[in-house]
Amino acid sequence: MTLLITRAVLVMAAIAAAKAQAPAGLAIGASAPDFSLPGVDGKLHTLNEYAGAKVLAVFFTCNSCPAAQLYEGSIAALHREYRDKGAAVVAINPNSPRATRLDELSYTDVTDSLDDMKIRAEFRHIEYPYLYDGGTQAVSRRFGPVATPQVFLFDGERKLRYSGRVDESRSAIDALLAGQPVAVASTAAVGCAPKWLSGSGGVGEEIAGIEKEPVALTAAAADELKKLRANPVGKLLVVNFWATWCSPCVSEFPDLQAIYRMYRSRDLAFVTVSENDPKEQAAVLKLLRSQHASTTNLIFASADTSAMEEAFDHEMSAAVPFTVLIAPNGDIVYQEEGEVTILALRRAILQNLPESKEYPGQRAYWSAK
């Protein structure tokens, strides 16, 4: 099934970046590299495990790439259709979380760690083997994928007969099962560049940039809070009420700042509102600076906490932390009293961000159960 993904946007930048770091790709006719990798099922999976299959399809994919996400259904369909016809499907995640910037997680709820792969597999009901190679990437480097997703198809003798896009893999599998040559042995893979440990990935530069971003704190009166509730920014807006004297507030603060850094490139706005007494402004600013909190940061301009909460929303809980996600039209699409469930908030954000022109189908992906 061909997906409606803008090819020009997906291919050029990602593939060029990957080729700069990746090893030479496996040549057509080469033998399948051996592997022994942990899967989301808690087991080790090896090449020999699939010795009985007439065809072996090895997909390089991941959690974080939006193109890979949109192809999960295609891989699942191939697994279901061909597992009783002699073809085995295996997916390998080559990405290292250590080589991934926060702004490269703008389309995902989790990272590419093995633990997070287990979360994704449960969320998306993944049945095919999903293996992790982000620790050393030794197996991935022997295959040499330039994008996620990318498929490598091997015949019964485990010789590579097709490499490239997922879309063309079905006809290639059919040919191999029929004992026929694959008409087109190689196509240009489309998607996201693997996150190789051999390259910096810009992680250090991103951290340095975050640490240089200005941090400010502004006193907000009742009128400003009333305007904030109506969402004046024209973007999806997270508002987090907190205080320095609230242990859960301080505990979740780094995760909330990470959320802002993950999704701000996709027009997410984030406002923190401190319920500290106005006299404690210096202490609040000190904590904000320690977290490099470049979000919009407000503090109650009045010590009358109840009146300030009422100005924002008369149904607002008096307890902190309190977090709301407000749509551009002012509707609250998610809220949580107490320490926020980070995964739930991320998914609510992904469900409500504007549809992506580059990766159409994202809102449906995150809204599916």
Image (cartoon, rainbow, N blue to C red):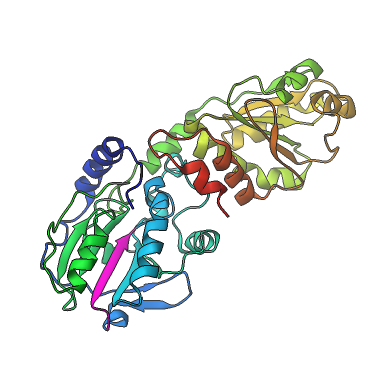
Residue bounds of the magenta highlight? 52-60
**Front position in the image: 304 or 184:** 184
Question: Extreme top residue here?
Answer: 223
Q: Confirm whether the magenta stretch covers residue 53.
A: yes
Say which residue appears at 26% left-offset and 82% top-offset.
Answer: 51
Q: Confirm whether the magenta stretch covers residue 54.
A: yes
Name above or below for residue 240 compared with residue 166: above
Q: Is residue 19 left or right of residue 209?
A: left
Name above or below for residue 68 compared with residue 269: below
**Front position in the image: 325 or 241:** 325
| Rendering coords of residue 353 (x, y %) | 54, 35
Give the quadrant of residue 259: top right
Q: Main secondary structure of the magenta part?
A: strand
Quadrant of the drawing holding the C terminus: bottom right
Q: Is residue 106 left or right of residue 368?
A: left
| Rendering coords of residue 106 (x, y %) | 47, 41
Say which residue appears at 13% left-offset and 56% top-offset.
Answer: 184
| Mark count | 0
Give the quadrant of residue 326: top right
| Rendering coords of residue 52 (x, y %) | 27, 84
Say which residue appears at 12% left-offset and 70% top-offset.
Answer: 180
Residue 142: in sight, yes or no? no
Name above or below for residue 23 compared with residue 38: above
| Rendering coords of residue 29 (x, y %) | 10, 68
Say which residue appears at 16% left-offset and 67% top-offset.
Answer: 160
Residue 357: in sight, yes or no? yes
Give the quadrant of residue 271: top right
**Front position in the image: 119 or 360:** 360
**Front position in the image: 284 or 347:** 347
